[in-house]
Amino acid sequence: MSLFEDFLTRLTQKFPEDGATMTMSAFIEANTTLKKKPFSFKGYEFQRQIVDDMHPNLAVIKCSQVGLTEIQIRKFFSFLKRTTAVNGIFSLPNDEMYKRVSKTRIKPIVDDEPVFNQHDTSKKPARSMDLYQVDDSFGFITGGKEGDATSINADIMFNDEVDLTDQEILALYGSRLQGSRIKIRQGFSTPTFEGYGIDSMFKASDQHEYLCRCSRCNHWNLPTFTPKFINIPGLSSDLNDLSEIDNDMVMKMDLDAAFTMCEHCGAKLDLLDPSKFEWVPRHPGRLSRGYWVRPYCAPELNTIRYIVEQLLDYKRKNSIRRWYNTVLGQPYNDASARLSIPEIEAVMKGEGNVDVPLGSPVAVGCDVGQTCHLVVADLRHAVPIVFKWLQVPADELKQAFADLRAQYNVVAGGMDLNPYAPLAHEIRDESKSVVMPIEYATSLKAAPISLVKDETDKITHVSSNRTGIIDKTVGSIRGHRIAFAGYGSKKLVIQTHLQDMVRVELPEQPAKWVKLTGDDHFFHALGYLLHALRIHDFILSQDEQEERQMSVIFGLISTVQQREAGLDFKSRVRSPSLLGLL
């Protein structure tokens, strides 16, 4: 290399190509490399608009094999480079992914690209697995823990794999931008369930779709993996859902001759010509920005053959949801992970008022908030029949419980300990511990039922495994071990609340139930009601065990304190174990 060429190289490294009108994609092309060649968007032209879009509230749904993690890393650090003295957070769902991405994806880009190395060679930039300095700006790489979401202030935040991240932690991340005037937050993820995570964010956005214009008829298409767009020689014309393709069908198909066609005229779409594509928003007036990256956006990788082969592979693994999520980039409504409307309607027995005589044994469940949701179940039948669905302001909750105790024989009850623990304790005491405060426990080792006592050995509340409570509540509905009645005009509200909880299985973590929108109050009220029956049965079994021990030691039967306190409801109503609740 000549002295002049060496001078130009060093000059370029010190003063990267940039300008006020230069787009982010042009900056990345001019200043970064891939496999020792200038970075190019060729074959991934759809990425350019997403990279250039610095909207403060952006969400991208993506399938696999489209290179978005690579490009968003470059976008993130290019922003830090081009903006003076800012902080950015790039979050991954967990420590394992954060360490892997930081080591194998981020570190090579930041260390090897001269544009991201500090101009003043006398100062060594701060570089570690969780922190990368670029000039006077800092990029924090985090693993989705609560401490990560509460300890760093930022101007820009990229959340990678939104759906695999704990949604409560994700919400906490928003507070990290409060002190900034820039406040850019962008999320990227393969989807999981309808209405959850990235799908929910996209639905609230302007919903950009990458449309393809037909060369023959000029019709704009939004290709999907359906018979309307996919032409596979040898595929039966009677097949309406391509996810039904199996090994026997594939033997009759010519996958190499398959193509994506225009829904209007049937001509083959030219998916390799970027001039035929354009990002178009469904709702251009909305304040947040959204993009949906589907398989045909990168057609050379996501061929029809590849999609079909992946379908068969995921079927063999009994993981069809993963095929929808990662290969098609579509959210999936898994019946096993979420209560369906038919399952709910199967236990709904009528909207009319139910005649429950005064003094009848009932159980109560309450989800506490500014508006409290109460459910009351008649226990005189083979299965509990929920006949009251109440919505009560928090300041009227004590009176509502008093009215129920005056009208019925409340033999068991449960309510959440939080967010108003003093109120829960007052209601517990006024009911003589019949209505027990319940605290959701999320620890991996949390017991199904753990009695929490004070220094006088009095039970203050119960701590119980959250996932276990919800699993049993869903199981009771699916197994028809509970019935609903007397709901009047609240039928749709109840169905909405029961469908708001989705069981999500995260990588290397136990399954957990997550909220879709937060409208889930009657669901949790039902959970507290059913769990209260198990709690009282558990307490009674402990008392009986103590009695047996006392009789062995002293040769007599002790008086059970909890019975005197009203905890024994088995003498007044059929055992919940006989009702199939345990």
Image (tube, grey):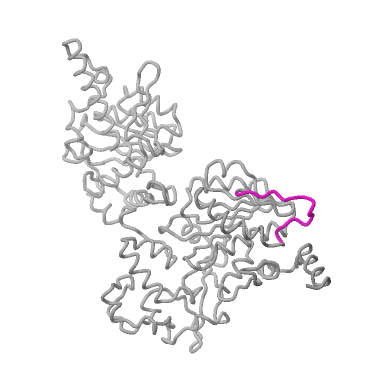
Q: Is residue 345 left or right of residue 303?
A: left
Magenta stretch: residue 323 in it?
Answer: no
Query: In the orientation shown, which residue stands out farthest toward the bottom?
Result: 216
Query: In the orientation shown, which residue stands out farthest toward the front?
Result: 1
Residue at the spot 74% in from the left edge and 51% down from the top edge? 136
Q: Relative to 20, say whether 335 is above or below.
A: above
Identify the magenta region: 115-129
Query: In the orientation shown, which residue stands out farthest toward the top?
Result: 554
Magenta stretch: residue 127 in it?
Answer: yes
The image quadrant where one finds the N terminus is bottom right
Q: Is residue 133 left or right of residue 285?
A: right
The image quadrant where one finds the C terminus is top left
Q: From the viewer's side, name the closer residue of 136 and 154.
A: 136
Q: From the viewer's side, name the closer residue of 38 and 49.
A: 38
Q: From the viewer's side, name the closer residue of 102 and 152.
A: 102
Residue at the spot 17% in from the left edge and 11% down from the top edge? 556
Residue at the spot 32% in from the left edge and 61% down from the top edge? 317
Q: Is residue 421 visible?
A: yes
**Residue 538, image x, y percentages:** 26, 29
**Residue 424, image x, y percentages:** 40, 29
**In the figure, residue 551 lies in which quadrant?**
top left
Q: Is residue 82 left or right of residue 47?
A: right
**Residue 312, image x, y percentages:** 33, 69
Q: Relative to 112, say whether 42 is above or below.
A: below
Q: From the viewer's side, name the closer residue of 259 and 227.
A: 259
Q: How many marks?
A: 0
Q: Is residue 237 visible?
A: no
Q: Please tell me whether the stretch drawn in magenta is mainly helix, strand or loop.
A: loop
